[in-house]
Image (cartoon, rainbow, N blue to C red):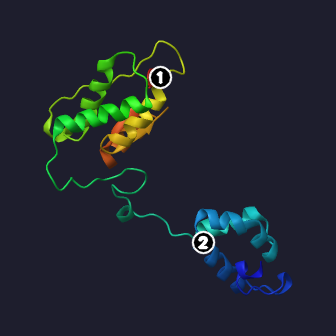
Amino acid sequence: MTEAFGDLPPVEDITSGDAQAEVQRLAKLDTAAYETVRKDAAVKMGWRASVLDAEVQKARPRETDEDFDDDTHGIESLEPWPESVDGASLAEEIRDRLRAHVVFGNTVDADAAAIWIIGTYLMDTWRLWPRLMVTSPTKACGKSTLLEVLDAMVLRGFIASNASPAAVFRAIEAWRPTLLLDEADTWMAQN
């Protein structure tokens, strides 16, 4: 496995320059590749893995405000569809997708959720838009599953659970997401 570590000399002969070069090389690896070689690299360098982790983290490029845009950090920006779309058939397709993943107590609930999803793409045209409150008679009925499906379909979906008011306001300001608050009844009363 020597090729995974470049041309490092034996541990007793490693200079500070050799170590820095190896840290820079490791910092360029993606997370999975680095995790695969980190322990062996630490042994080869004569370092503890935790020290190597810290040095590699420092060597990785930091995010700047210019890097922080809509298509990073899990918030997806979508391009408009190039051709006109039939709204009724789109709503039916969304409803069918919802029903494929979630069992609704009432048949019109899937219709309401489909219309609400479409409305998230038109937020700049509405002065007011209703919140979609998801409830169930018992625990573990699929509310979180519905939120995950909604997250995949709404405009800039962002699921949050147990978020502080400051974090919610920062997320809204930065990304203008469709906030999907999981278990909000348990943590929002405190905030």
Q: Residue at the location (41% across, 36% down)? A: 149
- Residue matched to label 2: 27
Q: Residue 136: which quarter of the image?
A: top left
Label 2: which secondary element? helix
Q: Residue at the location (45% across, 63% down)? A: 63
Q: Residue furthest top?
A: 137
* Left or right: 117 in relation to 160: left
Instruction: Name the mark on residue 100.
Output: none
Structural crowding at the residue carrying mark 2, measured as other residues with C-alpha within 10 Å and reported as few (<14), some (14–19) or many (≥20) = some
- Residue matched to label 1: 190
Are discs 1 and 2 less than 8 Å apart at CB? no
Q: Residue 35: which quarter of the image?
A: bottom right
| Badge 1 or badge 2: first in the primary sequence | 2
Q: Position of residue 51 (x, y in %)?
A: 73, 65
* Vertical position of residue 18 compared to residue 115: above or below: below
The quadrant in which the C terminus is found is top left
Label 1: which secondary element? loop
Q: Position of residue 83 (x, y in %)?
A: 15, 53
* Left or right: 103 in relation to 19: left
Query: How many angstroms separate mark 1 from mark 2 (CA)?
Result: 41 Å
Q: Position of residue 45 (x, y in %)?
A: 78, 76
